[in-house]
Every structure is written in C-alpha cells, then in structure tokens.
Image: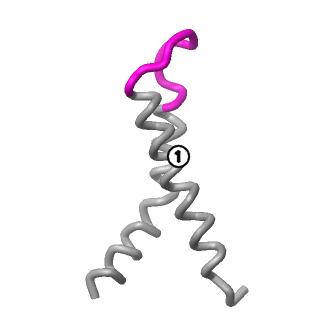
Amino acid sequence: MNIDLFKYILKLSVIPMLFLSLLLITHGADDDISIINIIGFILLIISGSYIIVDAKNNKDE
C-alpha cells in the first residue's frame, strides 16, 4: 500500500518537478554556477529518469 501511494505521488509531482528544475537551472547570472543550479540539475536527472523508466514499464500503449 505504501509503495503504491509513493508511486502515485511521484507521478503527480514529475511535471512540476521538471518546471522547477528548469527554473532553478536558469536562475542567477550566466557566468557562474551556484548551488541552486546544481539542485536544478539533480531534480532534472531525477524527474527525467523517472519518466524514462515509467515509459518503459508502461506496455499497454
């Protein structure tokens, strides 16, 4: 039961996480990398990998 709830919450939060990661990546000046940019890259990797894994597991289409 807990795993299904976690998967459902993760599915709902993937798209907002993508938008947040792109916002954090583009935050700040162009000539330096800050911690906020690194957090954005990490969120982008997490949400992108979840989308790819979910697309591979979704065989009914």
Tell me the chief SS of the magenta region: loop
Give the crowd class for mark 1: few <14, some 14-19, many >=20 residues within 10 Å.
Answer: many
Q: Where is residue 28 in the image (x, y as percent from the top left)?
A: 47, 17
- Asked whether 32 or 61 is in front, the reply is 32
Q: Is residue 14 left or right of residue 6?
A: right
Look at the image and tell me in which quarter the C terminus lies. Answer: bottom right
Q: Give the range drawn in magenta.
A: 25-35
Q: Is residue 51 above or below residue 43?
A: below
Q: How far from the left and from the top, in percent, is residue 31? A: 56, 9
Q: Where is residue 6 in the image (x, y as percent from the top left)?
A: 33, 74
Q: Mark 1 points at which residue?
A: 44
The answer to if 31 sits in the magenta stretch is yes
* Residue at left offset 61%, top offset 80%: 57
Residue at the image position 63 percent from the left and 82 percent from the top: 58
- Check disc 1 and report its element: helix, strand or loop: helix
Is residue 1 inside the magenta stretch? no
Is residue 43 shown left or right of residue 2? right
* Quadrant of image for the N terminus: bottom left
Quick one: 16 or 60, which is closer to the camera? 60
Q: Which of 17 and 53 is in front in this view?
A: 53
Circle 1: residue type: Leu
Q: Which residue is drawn at 57% across and 73% down?
A: 54
Considering only vertical position in the picture, is 56 above or below 46?
A: below
